[in-house]
Image (cartoon, coloured by chain):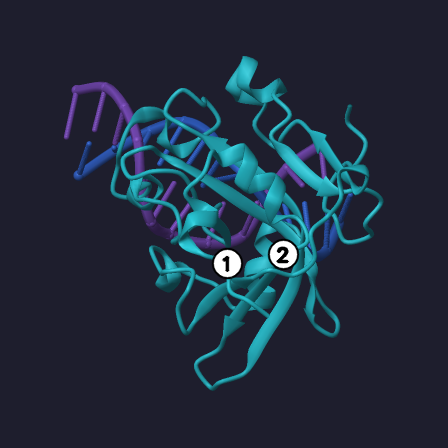
Chain colours: A cyan, B blue, C purple
Amino acid sequence: MAVLSLAFYRRPTLEVARDLLGRTLCRRLPEGEVRRGKIVEVEAYDGPEDRASHAHRGRTPRNTPMFAAGGIAYVYQIYGVHFCFNVVTGDDDYPAAVLVRATEAPVDGASAAGPGKLCHAFDIDRSLDGCGLRGRKLWLEEGTVVPDRRARRTPRIGVHYAGAWAAKRFRFLIRDHPEVSGPRRLR
DNA sequence: GGTGCGATTGCA
DNA sequence: GCAATCGCACCA
């Protein structure tokens, strides 16, 4: 199965987010085991104006990967407990990324429905922050394109503070998929 | 150097 | 409904 090209990521963030549905997230563990899971839910964080984005207050040590050209990972820790995995998108100096919120389980019994659970299931932590998405540890494969009638858009989760940006439908998921996290039907 | 809080989760 | 748990952004 073909690995997604850098050109795939270096497009407008909402396009990339939509196109990530159905793709396969792949992770090789240090001991060699490869875990794979079909992406079923993502959220776009697009540009410096997006009040829900980490990049809204400009470049900081944490969010620097978001400013790079598309095709690398942005991994951060939240609540001191969980990690969240993002795919950096767009051109150099334009801060944008897509949070991967859920995949089908990469390992039997290990749910990857929810950004924290996903990172746990794939053994993703901050050591992968800034890591290329065409490398030995981490890559995405073509998978199966999801047709429009199977895709759905809703507002993003947990960004109530973001004013008008909270209402934008930047979350994409596969309709009726059992492994999506949180509400499925908002608008 | 001090303070407040979050792109979450699991348990009461 | 809320605690866990800490990196980081922000202010001084």
Q: Residue at x 68, y 53 (%)?
A: A22
Residue A142 visible to an observer of this rendering: yes
Which of the labelled discs sits on residue A4, or is there none?
Answer: 1
> Which quarter of the image is occupied by the C terminus of chain A?
top right
Q: Residues within 10 Å of mark 1 (few under 14, many from 20)?
A: some
A170 up-or-down from A16: above or below: above
Q: Amino acid at mark 2?
A: Arg
Q: For the residue labelled by badge 1, is the local secondary structure a helix, a strand or a loop?
A: loop
Could you say where residue A162 lies in the image, as x and y percent from the top left? 51, 20
The residue that appears at 81% across and 31% down in the rendered structure is: A185
* Foreground residue among B3 and A111: A111
Of residues A121 and A93, the one nearer the viewer is A93
Chain where mark 2 sits: A
Q: Position of residue B9 (x, y in %)?
A: 65, 52
Q: Check disc 1 and give the amino acid type.
A: Leu
Rendered view: A76 above or below A158: below
Q: Residues at marks 2 and 1, common chain?
A: yes
The secondary element bearing badge 2 is classed as loop
Q: For the point 67% across and 38% down, which residue is it?
A: A172
Q: Nearer the viewer, mark 2 or mark 1?
A: 1
Q: Residue at x 32, y 25 (%)?
A: A57
Q: Tell me whether the residue at label 2 lies in contact with that at label 1, contact meaning CB atoms closer than 8 angstroms.
A: yes
The answer, for residue A77, to whether it is visible in the render is: no
Task: State the residue position of label 2.
Answer: A23
- Of residues A111 and A22, the one drawn nearer to the viewer in this rendering: A22
Crowdedness of circle 2 by 10 Å Cα count: few (<14), some, many (20+)? Answer: many
Q: Position of residue A129 (x, y in %)?
A: 36, 56
| Gap in angstroms between the C-alphas marked 2 and 1 | 9 Å
Q: Quadrant of the N terminus of chain A?
A: bottom right
Tell me the quarter of the picture where residue C10 sits.
top left
Choose top left, top right, bottom left or bottom right for residue A174. top right
Instruction: Indicate which disc, 2 or 1, sits on the residue closer to the N terminus.
Output: 1
